[in-house]
Amino acid sequence: MGKVIPLGCITKLDLEPDHVLEATKGKLEGLIIIGYHQDGSEYFASTYSDGAEVLWLLERCKKMLLGMPDGLE
C-alpha cells in the first residue's frame, strides 16, 4: 500500500482512527475520544477532568454537526 495522503476536508468516507489521531498530534489543547473497540464495546477517554466541560464540548460539537448542510453529515 502506498503513502496515505490526508484529505483535510469533510468526507462521506470512513477514515482509519489511527490516521485521524495522528493528524491531530501537537494541534489540540485537549480532546475527547468516543468510539468502539473492535469487539463492539463502547470506548470513552478525555483529557478534561470536569464532566461538565466534556458535556459542554460534546453539545457544541453536536450543534455544529446538526448545522451542516444536507449531504455532508
Image: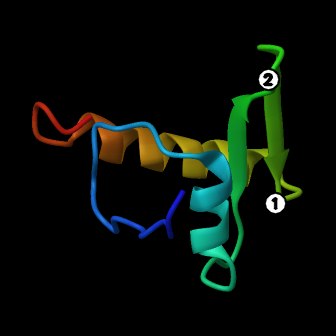
Q: Is residue 43 above or below residue 32?
A: above
Mark 2 and mark 1: Cα distance apart in space: 25 Å
x and y percentages locating residue 64 in the rendered image: 32, 47
Q: Which circle marks residue 19 in the picture?
A: none
Disc 2 residue crowd, few under 14, some 14–19, many 20+, Cα 10 Å? few
- Amino acid tagged 1: Tyr
Q: Amino acid at mark 2?
A: Gln
Q: Residue furthest left?
A: 70
From the top left corner, tell me how far across and down residue 9 is, in percent.
Answer: 28, 62
Residue extending farthest top: 40
Pair 2/1: label in front:
2
**Residue 20 location, quadrant:** bottom right
* Quadrant assignment for the N terminus: bottom right
Q: Which of 28/15 is in front? A: 15
28, above or below 66, in the image = below
Q: Secondary structure at mark 2?
A: loop
52 and 39: which is toward the camera: 39
Q: At x 44% / y 37%, what residue is drawn?
A: 14
Task: Identify the residue position indicated by label 1 in the image.
Answer: 48
Q: Label 2, on which residue?
A: 38
Asked where in the image residue 6 lies, by quadrant, the reply is bottom left
